[in-house]
Image (spheres, rainbow, N blue to C red):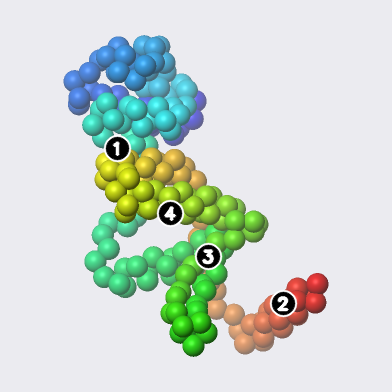
Amino acid sequence: MDDRDIQIGQRIRKYRKEKGLNQSELAEKIGKSLRTVQKYEKGEIEVAISVISDIAEVLGVSSSEILGYKSGIEHIGSLSDIMSFLFMLENVQDVDFKINVQKPSQGGKWECSISFDGQQNAKYNADLCLFLERWAEEQENFRTYFSSLENYSRWKAETLAYYSSSQVETNEPVELDFETRMKKRKEYMEAELKKQKD
C-alpha cells in the first residue's frame, strides 16, 4: 500500500460522498466492479490516470483535485511573475534548458525561445519534450476550433495530474570565490573546445 494511493482513495471517497453516490453507483458509472472501487478507496491498488479522469468526470471534480495536485502558481498578474517562474526553472536539478536568441540583424526576425534537449541526460528533459510536442498539437486543435474548450481544459488537467507525482528538486546556486570561479571557467572552456574538435 502506497501512501499516495491511500490519499487518492480518501479523496475519491470524500468527493463520492459529497456527490451523494454509494460505491456501487460509482462502480457502475465508471464501468468497474464494486470490489475495485472499494480497493481504490482503501488505497489497496493504484488508480490508473484514465480511471481517475473517469471518476473525476462522474464526481464533477478535476483529476488534479483527486490526485491532490495544487499548482504553486496562484496567479500570474504581471510580466515579473512569468520572469520569476523562469528564474525558478533555472534552479531545477533534473531539467536542463538553453535560451535561444535570434536578433533581427541575424535573420530579419526577432525571436527568443527556451529549448529542452530530449536526448540529454537531464532526468525530465524527454518528458518536457513529449509534453511540449503534445501541447503544440492540443493548442493548435483548440485555436483552429477543431477541439472544444472543455476538451482542451480536460487535457490540461489530465496532463497536470499525470505528472504530479514526478517530483523535482532545486539547487540554489552558491557564490564562488574568484579563484574557484576562474578555475571552473577554464575547465568549462577546455571542455567546450574539446567538443568542437570532436
Taking depth in this image into account, of 43 and 130 the one nearest to the observer is 130
Q: Earlier in the sequence, mark 1 or mark 4?
A: 1
Q: Earlier in the sequence, mark 2 or mark 1?
A: 1
Q: Amino acid at mark 4?
A: Ala
Mark 1–mark 3 CB contact (< 8 Å)? no
Q: Earlier in the sequence, mark 2 or mark 3?
A: 3
Nearest-to-viewer mark from 1 and 3: 3
Find residue 133 and report its horizontal and vertical position in percent: 49, 52
Nearest-to-viewer mark from 3 and 4: 4
Distance of label 1 from label 4 (alpha carbons): 22 Å
Distance of label 1 from label 3 (alpha carbons): 30 Å
Q: Earlier in the sequence, mark 1 or mark 3?
A: 1
Q: Residues within 10 Å of mark 2 (few under 14, many from 20)?
A: few
Q: Earlier in the sequence, mark 2 or mark 4?
A: 4
Name the residue located 52 percent from the left edge and 74 percent from the top edge: 100
Q: Amino acid at mark 2?
A: Glu
Taking depth in this image into account, of 161 and 40 the one nearest to the observer is 161
- The residue indicated by pointer 3 is 115
Name the residue located 32 percent from the left edge and 57 percent from the top edge: 73
Nearest-to-viewer mark from 2 and 4: 4
